[in-house]
Amino acid sequence: MFIVIQALESGWLADNYIEIMGVVTSLVYLYFSVKQRIWLWPFGILSSGLFVYIFYHTKFYAGMSLQAYYLVISTYGWYHWTHGVKEGDSPQIPVIRLTHRTGLLSAVFFIVLFIAAALILDGFTNSDVPWGDSFTTAGSIIATWMLARKILEHWLLWVIIDGVAVTLYLYKGMYPTVLLYLVYTVIAIVGFYQWRKSLIKNLKQ
């Protein structure tokens, strides 16, 4: 309570309310992700819109582009989770495993995207974290696509991405976002085990 009062008196909350809103909507999005509820997608769209603004003003240009991508992939995920069920199937899109072919293609795409984004940021922007920003951006693009397809292993990828993101945002002094990504890291582990239970259950049916 003392911290909240101090933040109000210093004007910190007034200066950072957009980032706080982004954190809150992102946590709601994450909760629905773990629960496999379709409401994750509208909250994902809302949080992404907020973080486009936030990352622009903190010079996370790759991160800003990533949030714009989230707006698109969230629309795709919303559609796929709603209309991707075939007639006669259960009413919910099932969790699936990552195949060797998809994993290999995803790894190649990640490397190409990571290096290309880093070189662009390093050479044509004033970003002071071009390689870290590009790493989390490339990994997040892959992980979010895997989420849209309900691939189990996307949670493991998030553990790595979120861990790197924590160090980046700590460096930039974005403390609400640091807290958010620490929570992300923990819940990604929880999400993996929750989705794995769902996968095992579906296989037994």
Image (cartoon, rainbow, N blue to C red):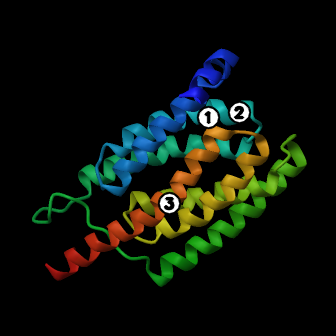
Mark 1 and mark 3 lie on one chain; the one further toward the N terminus is: 1
For residue 44, side relative to residue 35 (left or right): right
Q: Which mark is residue 52?
A: 1
Image x and y of residue 156, in percent: 51, 70
Question: What kind of element bears circle 1?
Answer: helix
Query: Looking at the image, which residue is at 37% across and 49% down?
Result: 31
- Asked if the residue at tag 3 contacts the one at tag 1, i.e. Cβ–Cβ closer than 8 Å, the answer is no
Of marks 2 and 3, the one in the foreground: 3
For residue 116, side relative to residue 193 (left or right): right
Q: Residues within 10 Å of mark 2 (few under 14, many from 20)?
A: some
For residue 156, side relative to residue 58 (left or right): left
Query: Looking at the image, which residue is at 42% across and 49% down?
Result: 30
Query: Would you identify the image quadrant in which residue 42 lies?
Result: top left
The Cα–Cα distance between marks 1 and 2, rounded to whole angstroms, is 6 Å
| Residue position for label 3 | 186
Query: Looking at the image, which residue is at 65% across and 54% down?
Result: 137
| Residue position for label 2 | 56
Image x and y of residue 191, in percent: 40, 63
Q: Which amino acid does label 1 sit on?
A: Val
The Cα–Cα distance between marks 2 and 3, rounded to whole angstroms, is 27 Å
- Asked if the residue at tag 2 contacts the one at tag 1, i.e. Cβ–Cβ closer than 8 Å, the answer is yes
Image x and y of residue 58, in percent: 75, 35
Mark 2 and mark 3 lie on one chain; the one further toward the N terminus is: 2
Of marks 1 and 3, the one in the foreground: 3
Q: In this view, does 80 lie above or below 189?
A: above
Q: Nearer the viewer, residue 59 or 186?
A: 186
Image x and y of residue 188, in percent: 47, 61
Q: In this view, does 13 lie above or below 151?
A: above
Can the viewer see residue 145?
A: no
Q: Nearer the viewer, residue 100 or 97?
A: 97
Q: Which amino acid does label 3 sit on?
A: Val
